[in-house]
Structures are given as structure tokens and as C-alpha cells.
Image (spheres, rainbow, N blue to C red):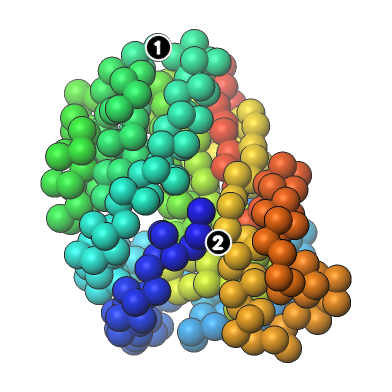
Amino acid sequence: MKEDDIRPDLLRVAQQEALDWDIRWLLDRRTQWADVDCPACAGPGHAREFDKNGFAYRRCADCGTLFTSPRPTEGVLKEFYALSRNYDFFNEHIFPASEEARLQQIFRPRAAFVARLCADHGIRKGRMLEIGAGFGTFVRAVRELGFLDSITVVQTGPLAQQCLQRGADTVIPDLMGALPGQGLFDLIACFEVIEHAFDPRAFLQHARAHLRPGGLMVLSCPNVRGFDLAELGALSDSVDHEHLNYFHPQALMALLERAGLRHLSHSTPGRLDVELVRKKWLANPELARDPFLAQLLLGADDGPRQAFQEFLAANRLSSHLVMVATKPAEEGAAA
Ligand SMILES: [Zn+2]
């Protein structure tokens, strides 16, 4: 898989205008931003590590989570995602143009993973809630496998209709609202959502309230200790104005615990770290400071690079983190 299959280069250039508009919109509301402590452990000790796009990124001294503070509040973010021109651009250009590639390379493997997970935990014909379903491509992949009885998604805006077309039974606009008639879910999926949350703990607690005891939650997010993010830091494309929280496995495990969920397993099935770092190094050769890594990433032979990416994924060292948690059967620490 190449990154260009997912985000074709030409489209990405045209997207820049939309991104710039989005960033300006957020910066124009700086007076409404709020200071926060570590979103993973609530630790008050943190130091400013770098700035990007007008956001200050801070590193938690206790747990090593990277996060923005100050950050747009919940209300500002809600308005932002309703207006975002970048999202409009994705919906009009990138998602339709790349849906087949995304289905093949991301969502079918993801659906197969979730199907195995459900089978392993005795969930048959279960009820799933997907938070942040986007274009509905995961819904489509899950429908193909037919292992779920019902699919409810949380999705606002024009994408709600896309999700219904791809097989969602019910679309609701807001996780925080009641889910009339839905009861509790066997499975909650939220892919690349928690890094956008103003208050990730509150987000998980809201999600948890919709999960039956013993039910599963699958979530994915960037891993700040993975190769792409650790190597590139501020220069990583994952570090953008939408991502407020950059956890790593141990930090996310601790956060889940604080939200009344129990960690079951995690992996880093990323496939793009090496290519992302290689592209940055090719464009900015001064970044390739380590001679051995430079030889590996910039050399003519693609084989070692592929093997290195597999090594990163197998050893939980990729920047793409997937974690599975459960809601303990007896009431846990959180309300
Ligand atoms: Zn922390």
C-alpha cells in the first residue's frame, strides 16, 4: 500500500486552501480556547515542546502524552466540524475518489479484525455503535461480512446520508444525546476520533454509558511513540490543527481505566510509517541525521523498508494504534 492510494497528491495540493481556511477559523476564536492539563493522566506538569499552525504542543511530564493547550472548547469544536471546509473537501473529492482503495486496504482488514474479535468474545449478531463513521466505509465493510445484527452510527452533516446508503440502520447526530430505543450496544467502534476530543475522558465515559457490561470498545488513534511521530515530531502530517491528543499505548490504557473501561489488547497495525518518514526525508534531506536509518529509508532497495515496516507493526512501534477495551461486568471505578 502506498500513501498516495489513500490521499492522492493532486487532491492534497488543492486541499491546502481548505485547510488554511479551517486553521484561520480556529485561530480567530483563540479567546474561546481553554487551558487543559494532560488529557490522559490529568497530570498538571507539562512543558511546551513546539508550536505548529498557531497551536502550542505540550508534553506531559508524568505520562509522556503530547497535547495542545490551550485548545478550542467543546462548543467551538462542534461549530468547527459543522463548518470545516477541509471536511467538505474530503466529502466531495477525497472520499469518493479513494473509497475503493480505502475499502480494500483499510476497512476490509479492519472489519475482519472486528469480526474475529466479536467471535472470540462470543458476540454473535451483536449490535454495534460506530462513533464518527465518516463516509460509512467501515459500515459497508462490516455489512459485507454480515456478523452484526444492527449498526448505529454517530455522524453529523451530509455524511449521515452516506452512512445510511452504506448499510447503517440508524444515524444519530450526537453521542451526548440520548439514543432512544437503542439500549446498550455489544460493540462500540471509534476510529481516529479520540485524538479530536476536547475532553477524551468525558468522551470515553459517554461512550461507555452506551456499552453493555462485558461489551467491547475498539478504538484507534495516533501513537506518539510510533516511528512516524517519534521521528518527525512537529513535521509529521499527523500533527495538525484537528488533533489535540497524542497518546501512546500505556497512556491510553491509563485513560481507559480512568473512564471505567478495562484494556484487553492493543496493536499497531500501521503500514505507512516508513513511507511517511521517507517522503519527508527525501523532501528535506537535512532531517535524515542518523546514517543507518538514512541508508535504510533512502536506499534503492525497497525490500528492507517493507521488512522494517513489518517490524514496526509487529513490535507495536508503528504510529497507528488500535486498542480494545471492555466495560467491566461489575461496576468499575468510574460513574
Ligand atoms: Zn499525562
In this rendering, the answer to whether 10 lies above or below 202 is: below
Going by the numbered disc 2, the residue's amino acid type is Asn
In this rendering, does residue 37 appear at all?
no
Displayed quadrant of residue 198: bottom left
Front in this rendered view, residue 318 or 156? 318
Residue 315 point in image, percent of width and height = 75, 44
Mark drawn on residue 124: 1
SS at mark 1? Answer: loop
Dot 2 crowding, Cα within 10 Å, few <14, some 14–19, many 20+: many
In this rendering, does residue 170 appear at all?
yes
Front in this rendered view, residue 195 or 32? 195
Residue 280 point in image, percent of width and height = 61, 78
SS at mark 2? Answer: strand
Dot 1 crowding, Cα within 10 Å, few <14, some 14–19, many 20+: some
Q: Residue at x 57, y 42 (%)?
A: 322
Displayed quadrant of residue 154: top left
The reply to whether the C-beta atoms of the residues labelled 1 and 2 are less than 8 Å apart is no
Residue, disc 2:
245
Q: Residue at x 55, y 61 (%)?
A: 245
- 276 sits left or right of 24 in the view: right
Residue 327 point in image, percent of width and height = 53, 26
Q: Residue at x 75, y 80 (%)?
A: 288
Going by the numbered disc 1, the residue's amino acid type is Arg
Front in this rendered view, residue 306 or 265? 306
In this rendering, the answer to whether 208 lies above or below 316 is: above
Displayed quadrant of residue 142: top left
In this rendering, the answer to whether 139 lies above or below 244 is: above
Q: Of the two numbered discs 1 and 2 on the same chain, state the one appearing first in sequence.
A: 1
Q: Is mark 1 within 8 Å of ligand 1?
A: no
Q: CA distance from mark 1 to mark 2?
A: 34 Å
Residue farthest along the front direction in this orientation: 300
